[in-house]
Image: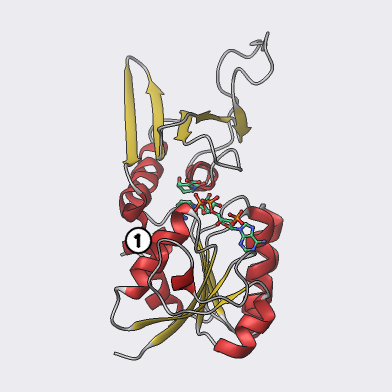
């Protein structure tokens, strides 16, 4: 199998560490460099917890020039992730982005940039196969149940709310459900935010607590019945088979794909 040369941005992060281990343990993947805002000029094994010989760069352009990667895996923050994805597309490096918090306008712009260059790119709000199925099953259910509340629950170090997964879920549900205001027409919040965020009338509630990893429940209410579809990630290894699939798939694409549901059969 042809070797895929990979750069990881955010290697010291919770997801970045897992991604480094994935790339190091996959025969046809080579970690040619990492992007880290500290440790510039060092080799990764000089940083505690790593054994890799990959060089560390704080400058993404220098990293690309010297390591000539095929793929950038970005697991950073919303602002940095957007910047890295733009630079990658501009320089012909295929981005696989797990970073969340991009707006629809930003996604559209990145998609147009990839299309213009006919370059493969994947932005996946959730790499866990079970989470993708939870979204697909919810989309099936939304045809029959129009009253929906999404409860997403995450660790308390998360920067963006609602989660990328919750936004993606609401987008998928809206493809099969007409916009509808839920709850009583005259309902009033006595404390702002009590009814959660509003996406075409679907309510999204974000829970942040230490001890959690990544969880989501989609609740559908009907006459005399309720359907609940839930996914839990209990560790971050749960995301890695999706990262591996995305790296392999992005090499064959010539446009930007947003969401793993578009590449999982
Ligand atoms: N798609 C998916 O399946 C999943 C997506 N995520 C998303 O992935 C992202 C990362 O999550 P997580 O690993 O938990 O977050 P962490 O905070 O643990 O890691 C983020 C890393 O990004 C680094 N970073 C921040 N700014 C820069 C910069 N300017 N240049 C280089 N590196 C930078 C941080 O470094 P420093 O220590 O210096 O701040 C840190 O190491 C989030 O957006 C999260 O929502 C998370 C889980 C699954
Ligand atoms: O920040 C996280 O942890 C996660 N972020 C992603 C999101 O925003 O949906 C994916 C997963 O839920 C974990």
Q: Is residue 254 visible?
A: yes
Q: Is 114 left or right of 13, judged from the image as shown? A: right
The answer to whether the beta carbon of the residue marked 1 is less than 8 Å from any atom of ligand 1 is: no
Q: With respect to residue 116, does 265 lie above or below?
A: above
Occupied quadrant, residue 62: bottom right
- The residue carrying mark 1 is 240
Q: Tag 1: Cα neighbours inside 10 Å, few (<14), some, or many (≥20)?
A: some
**Which is more toward the observer, 98 or 188?**
98
Q: Quadrant of the C terminus?
A: bottom left
Occupied quadrant, residue 249: bottom left
- The residue that appears at 47% across and 36% down in the rendered structure is 155
**Which is more toward the observer, 120 or 210?**
210
- The residue that appears at 36% across and 17% down in the rendered structure is 223
Q: With respect to residue 14, does 166 lie above or below?
A: above
Q: Is residue 263 visible?
A: no
Expressed as whole percent of the image width and height from the top left, the position of residue 143 reads: 41, 39
**Which is more toward the observer, 190 or 137?**
190
Occupied quadrant, residue 15: bottom left
Q: Quadrant of the N terminus?
A: bottom left
Expressed as whole percent of the image width and height from the top left, the position of residue 251 reads: 44, 82
Expressed as whole percent of the image width and height from the top left, the position of residue 142 reads: 42, 37
* Element assignment for label 1: helix
- The residue that appears at 54% across and 42% down in the rendered structure is 163
Expressed as whole percent of the image width and height from the top left, the position of residue 192 reads: 69, 17
């Amino acid at each position: 199998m042809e070797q895929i040369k990979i750069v990881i941005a955010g290697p010291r992060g919770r997801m970045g560490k897992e991604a480094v281990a994935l790339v190091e343990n996959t025969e046809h993947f080579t970690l040619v460099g990492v992007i880290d805002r500290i440790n510039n000029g060092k080799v990764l094994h000089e940083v505690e917890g790593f054994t890799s010989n990959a060089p560390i760069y704080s400058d993404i352009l220098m990293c690309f020039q010297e390591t000539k990667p095929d793929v950038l895996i970005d697991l950073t923050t919303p602002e940095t992730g957007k910047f890295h994805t733009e630079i990658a597309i501009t320089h012909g490096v295929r981005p696989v982005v797990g970073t969340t918090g991009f707006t629809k306008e930003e996604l559209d712009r990145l998609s147009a940039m990839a299309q213009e260059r006919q370059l493969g790119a994947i932005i996946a709000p959730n790499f866990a196969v079970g989470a993708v199925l939870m979204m697909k099953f919810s989309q099936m259910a939304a045809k029959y149940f129009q009253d929906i509340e999404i409860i997403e629950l995450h660790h308390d170090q998360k920067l963006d709310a609602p989660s990328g997964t919750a936004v993606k879920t609401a987008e998928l549900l809206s493809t099969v459900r007409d916009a509808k205001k839920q709850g009583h027409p005259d309902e009033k919040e006595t404390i702002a935010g009590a009814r959660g965020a509003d996406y075409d009338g679907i309510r999204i509630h974000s829970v942040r607590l230490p001890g959690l990893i990544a969880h989501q429940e989609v609740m559908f209410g009907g006459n005399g019945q309720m359907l609940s579809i839930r996914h839990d990630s209990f560790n971050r290894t749960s995301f890695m088979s999706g990262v591996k699939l995305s790296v392999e798939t992005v090499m064959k694409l010539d446009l930007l794909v947003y969401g793993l549901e578009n590449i999982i059969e």
